[in-house]
Amino acid sequence: MSTFSNYDFKGKKVLVRVDFNVPLDKLYNITDDNRMRATIPTIQKILNDGGSVILMSHLGRPKGGPEDKYSLRHLVKHLYELLGSNTHVFFADDCIGEQAYLTSSMMKGGEVLLLENLRFYKEEEAGDEAFAQKLSKLGDVYVNDAFGTAHRAHASTAVIAQFFEPGKKMFGLLMEAEVTNAEKVMHNAEKPFTAIMGGAKVSDKILLIENLLSRADNIIIGGGMAYTFWKAQGKIVGNSLVEEDRLPLALTLLEKAKAKGVKIYLPMDSTIADQFSNDATTTNSESYGIPSGWMGLDIGKKAIADFTEVIMKSRTIIWNGPMGVFEMAKFQAGTKAIAEAVAAATAKGAFSLVGGGDSVAAVNLFGLADQVSYVSTGGGALLEYFEGKVLPGIAAIKD
């Protein structure tokens, strides 16, 4: 796919687009460093070859210019710790300013420079060509290792590649792994192929479900979106979350699945609550007969058993979205059980890919991330890839 692993970076200044958009607390401590850790092997390979690394990333959603709470300087200390004390890590307080160019020009092999937040310039998200060209002057080689932003046609992810000749623009190790694993699921899936869809809204997953109808054998639907499917069939779901304007669409998807021979599994029972709270009174109910005043907030025991049986017979599994409001301890049994089933199926030889922020958070919460085949770092990017869309950040390198 790319020449990264075979490329000798000795003496090269390598401009690497990473996704360091990590969550920070009020004291600017990183609360989840997975995105940073994921790109360390790419950085280390360049450093070990004797190259120098210029890192560029965005952080948060700054409005119209620099804001201290979105400064990448808050990440320097942790980056230094991740790379080890033998690596010099410099910081430039601008991504295209004089300091950035000067520091870059003086860098030696084995050194790292982190540039300030790209989104302090509106030109980044606008995909401005002149801005991309200014960034390109910082390096001899361009490496895109930011799968999480691959679906954005931003200056640093898509436009910049045109300023590097074919042999000097490539994917990093993380990007390679993301694309390889995604393509394995979508184009080379061993059967039976089961897609597990969760989350609140059908509208967020329409294109994904439609694309999967041509590929998957089974589609398991949990989370809030399941109640839209039940109500579309005329069932009573109490006060459960329903997208009223999507009822006809849910019915159409069920009909399309039937016509294509794809089995759609909805939760036959739910853990229901009298309020959206961890302190709520809860009980079990059939998902298609939830009383008024009650809402489904997790899949029930029968649904867990049904879904687990399907998962355990699968050879390829993709999981996107939780089965309930797993952030609340009272409603995490379903999501935890599905995570355990995916891990157990993987141990039996299935290939499993977990993607989407909440699903990734779930396997991490339950300590199962290392028991599935691949955990994607790209939420929106993975979703759009599975919807069949061309991702600008990937196309820019491949083209």
Image (cartoon, rainbow, N blue to C red):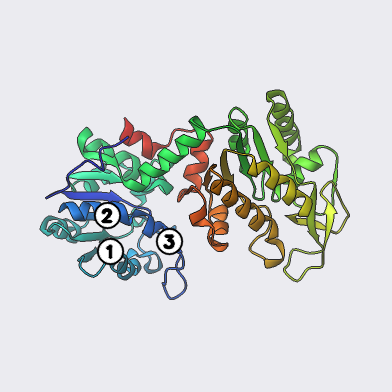
- Is the residue 24 above or below the residue 263 in the image? below
Question: Which residue corresponds to mark 3?
Answer: 22
Q: Amino acid at mark 1?
A: Leu
Tell which tag, 1 or 3, sits nearer the viewer.
Answer: 1
Q: Residue 43's mark?
A: 2
Question: Which residue corresponds to mark 1?
Answer: 83
Say which element carries label 2.
Answer: helix
C-alpha span from label 2 to label 3: 18 Å
The reply to whether residue 20 is in sight is no
Tell me the quarter of the image containing the N terminus: top left
* Image point (52%, 37%), residue name: 386
Q: Position of residue 90 (x, y in %)?
A: 22, 65
- Is the residue 362 above or below the residue 174 in the image? below
Q: Is residue 397 left or right of residue 64?
A: left
Q: What crowding class fits label 2: few (fewer than 14 Cα within 10 Å), some (14-19), or many (20 or more)?
A: many
Closer to the camera, 116 or 258? 258
Closer to the camera, 236 or 83? 83
Q: Position of residue 235 (x, y in %)?
A: 85, 42
Q: Amino acid at mark 3?
A: Val
Q: Mark 2 and mark 3 in contact? Answer it, CB < 8 Å.
A: no
C-alpha span from label 1 to label 3: 17 Å
* Image point (46%, 68%), residue name: 31
- Is the residue 366 above or below the residue 122 in the image? below
